[in-house]
Amino acid sequence: MALRIEVVHARPDRADVVVIRLPDGATVRDALLAAGVSAERVGIFGRVVKPETRLADGDRVEVYRPLKLDPKEARRRRARR
């Protein structure tokens, strides 16, 4: 059975979505390779996962952008204002 997977790459101005089919037992790494995307941080439905994580049919692999600023530091800066 083939898995239907969405790979979503979030960009500042838009999100690129690629729908791919992979064999059972495929991993997040396989999905990224098939979609032609490289990433340091990825998740499935908002939960950060490792590239070795096995996929299930209907999973949405999300490629996260690097943070420009640590969220704690951003809160500190806002509090100072």
Image (tube, helix red, strand yellow):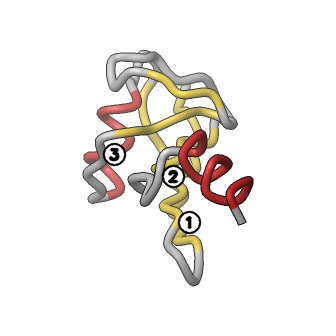
In terms of depth relative to the viewer, which is nearer, 11 or 5?
11
In terms of depth relative to the viewer, which is nearer, 6 or 70?
70
Residue 12's spot in the image, x, y percent? 53, 76
* Residue type pointed to by label 3: Leu
Query: Which residue, given by chain and number where applicable, does mark 1 sit on?
Result: 17
Per the image, label 1 sits on a secondary structure element best described as: strand
Q: Which residue appears farthest toward the bottom when viewing the image?
A: 13
Residue 14's spot in the image, x, y percent? 59, 79
Q: Earlier in the sequence, mark 3 or mark 1?
A: 1
* Residue type pointed to by label 2: Val
Which dot marks residue 63?
none
Q: Earlier in the sequence, mark 2 or mark 3?
A: 2
Per the image, label 2 sits on a secondary structure element best described as: strand
**Left-right relation of 50 to 73:** left
Against 25, is 3 above or below? Answer: below
Q: Earlier in the sequence, mark 2 or mark 1?
A: 2
| Cα gap from disc 3 to disc 1, whole angstroms | 12 Å
Residue drawn at (40%, 31%) of the image: 28
Which corner quadrant holds the C terminus? bottom right
In terms of depth relative to the viewer, which is nearer, 50 or 69?
69
Which dot marks residue 7?
2
Are the residues tagged 2 and 1 within 8 Å (C-beta)?
Answer: yes
**Left-right relation of 65 to 43:** left
Which dot marks residue 32?
3
Are the residues tagged 2 and 3 within 8 Å (C-beta)?
Answer: yes
Against 37, is 58 above or below? Answer: above
